[in-house]
Amino acid sequence: MTAAAFRYIDRASYDPNATEPFKKALGQIEDLRGQESHYTTDNSGFALYNSPAKETAFTDDAEVRSGYYAEVEELLRKKLPGVKKVAIFDHTIRRRTPGSARSPVQLVHVDQTPRAAEARVRRHLPEDEVEELLKGRYQIINVWRPIENPASDFPLALIDWRSIAPSDFVKVDLLYPKEWRENGEVAPDSESMFSTEGYEVKGETYAIAPNEGHRFFYAKDMTPEEVMFIKCFDSRSHTMTEGKTDIAHGSGHTAFIDPQTPAGSPGRQSIEVRCLVFYE
């Protein structure tokens, strides 16, 4: 067990035109170690597995796409019964190292709203397959793995879906900078921290509002030989018209500063592969 200050959406000051309408709230984080089998993508929205990868460096984007993507698809088919099709649409590598373009995200969120998930299907699947695929069950799952060293620094925390209230979800635009430099994004030139100047809308996501009932979990010192399935959407979840009450939509998640991290621990490095998963 550890504790942290989590960065949440602040309903009281939320403005769709703001980039920093956030607040911090303290929370406890339970270690998944020893109880992994009790938490699945169906009931909690996340699942931890031991699954060493052939790819270990993750420095060549072409090799990640040609080799590691196949490993991820094989793992999804192995762990999730009934999968008929997997479409991997992108990945992000985060390194908390000097000069890195992508650092760990400290904001409690769920990556996809229902509208955004459907848009992903329409964007990434052949047009002649889309309508039939949308009739069946489909999910968006991020397959998250530490790179090079254990994720002791800025570890990943996840909320058990069953502890999130419907009122905790706030739809927000997913913003990306209009310009990028080699070592990172170009920050908006603005006098106000609340300005969206310099960004453009690339989708829709759920930010999460604070709730004392949230149950956070993490895998302490998660290693590169392990992966976390993070569900971001499920067309059969109870949030959907024909969904089931016992199926999670997804898991709110965030990076956090763990006060128990030993001094001198190497900066966190990780890869998350985003996958559309379709079922029979």
Image (cartoon, rainbow, N blue to C red):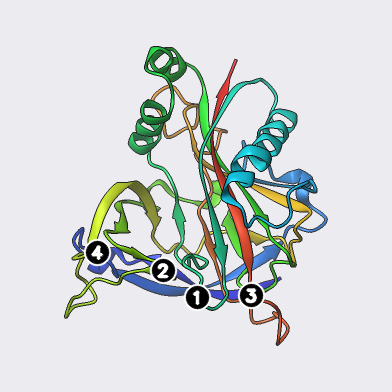
Q: Identify the residue shown where x is 43% and y is 12%.
A: 132
Helix, strand or loop at label 3? It is loop
Label 4 is placed on what type of residue? Tyr
Q: Which residue is mark 3?
A: 267
In 3D space, how far apart are the residues under numbered discs 3 and 1 (Cα atoms)? 12 Å
Mark found first going from the N terminus, 2 or 1? 1
Which one is closest to the eye, mark 3 or mark 4? 3
In 3D space, how far apart are the residues under numbered discs 2 and 1 (Cα atoms)? 7 Å
Q: Which residue is mark 4?
A: 14
In the rendered image, residue 167, in percent from the top left (x then y), is placed at 36, 50
Which one is closest to the eye, mark 2 or mark 4? 2
Helix, strand or loop at label 1? It is loop
In the rendered image, residue 76, in percent from the top left (x then y), is placed at 67, 33
Q: Are marks 2 and 3 in contact (CB under 8 Å)?
A: no
Helix, strand or loop at label 2? It is strand
Q: Which quarter of the image is occupied by the N terminus?
A: bottom right
